[in-house]
Amino acid sequence: MYSWTNIYKQKISIEVVRVLLINHENLKNEIINLISKGDNDRVEFRRHSGGPNLLGKIISSFANASGGKLILGVNNKGKINGCNKKYVMETFNKAKEKLIPCPIVSIEFIEINKKVLAIISIEKTEKIISSSLGVFKRVNNSEEIMVTEEIKSKQLNAVTKDEIKDTVGEMAQQISQLTITLEETIQRYRSQNKISRKIIEWIACGIIGIILSIIINL
C-alpha cells in the first residue's frame, strides 16, 4: 500500500528521470550537429584520446584560447567509431595530473548509433595552463605553440609584484623555447623506436615542469 509521501517521492523521481532524459537527448542532438560541421577553433574530433601527454596538450590548448569541446570516438571525416570508456577515463584522469594548473574540465559519455562517445568540455582560463609537452593554444582547428610575449602577457595578468615581473618574463621565454625544442625533437625521432622518443620526451618534460613549478609558486 502506497502512502501519499511515497507517491510524492515517486513523482519527483519520475520528473528527475524525465529531465535527465531530455538533457541527454539534447546533448546527443548537439553532438550530432557538431559532427556535421567538423573541427573548428572550439571543437575537435578525435578517434582516440592518445596518451595522457597528448590529451593534456589538447585540453590545455583549449583552456589557453577560448575553451571548447573535445569529442572522442569520431574520426576527422565525421565517422562515429566509438571509444573505450574505461581507457578514456583512465587517460583523462592522468592527463589532468599533467596540467599546471588544471583548468575547469569535465567529461561525460553518450551513446550514438550504439557507439560510445566521450565529450570533454574545457573552460577558458585567465592563467596560463601548461601541459607536459609545453604551452599551447587552440588556433582554428589545431594546437599552436604560444610565443614568449603571449605567455608573458597572460601570466603577468595574475602578477602584481613589480619585483617578479622580469623573472616571469625570462621564464616565459625559456618555456617557449623549450616547447619549440621539444616539438622539433619529437618530430626528429618519429621515425625511430618508441623508447628513444619516450626518453627525449621525459627529459624535456622534466625541464619544463621544473620551470613551471617555480612560476606557479612565486
Image (tube, rainbow, N blue to C red):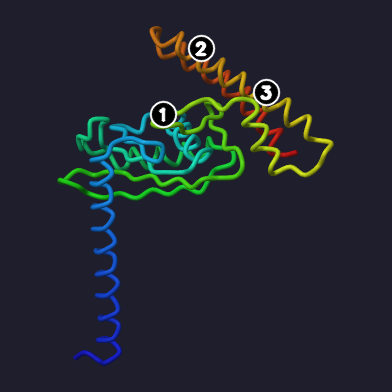
**Residue, x 28% and y 75% (percent of image)?**
13
Circles 2 and 1, Cβ within 8 Å, touching? The answer is no
Residue 162: give x, y in percent of width and height: 82, 39
Foreground label between 2 and 1:
1
The secondary structure type at the circle numbered 3 is helix
* Pointer 3 or 2: first along the chain: 3
Q: Which residue is mark 3?
A: 173
Instruction: Name the N-terminal-most of marks 3 and 1.
Output: 1
Closer-to-camera residue (41/69): 41
Whichever of labels 2 and 1 marks the residue nearer the N terminus, that label is 1
Q: Label 2: which residue?
A: 185
Q: Crowding near pointer 2: few (<14 within 10 Å), some, many (20+)?
A: some
Q: Nearer the viewer, residue 99 or 173?
A: 173
Identify which amino acid the numbered label 3 is placed on: Gln
The foreground one among 75 and 214 is 75
Say which quadrant the C terminus sits in. Answer: top right
Amino acid found under the numbered disc labelled 2:
Thr
Q: Residue at x 57, y 33 (%)?
A: 130
**Mark 3 or mark 2: which is in front?**
3
> Element under label 2?
helix
| Image spot of residue 12 (x, y percent) | 30, 79
Q: Is residue 11 left or right of residue 132?
A: left
CB-based contact (under 8 Å), mark 3 and mark 2: no
| Distance from the alpha carbon under mark 2 to that under mark 1 | 19 Å
Callout 1: helix, strand or loop? strand
Q: Amino acid at mark 1?
A: Ser
Residue 71 location, x and y as percent? 33, 40
Foreground of the two, 183 or 203? 183
Return the residue at label 1.
142
User: Which residue is at 22% across, 49% downward?
Assistant: 111
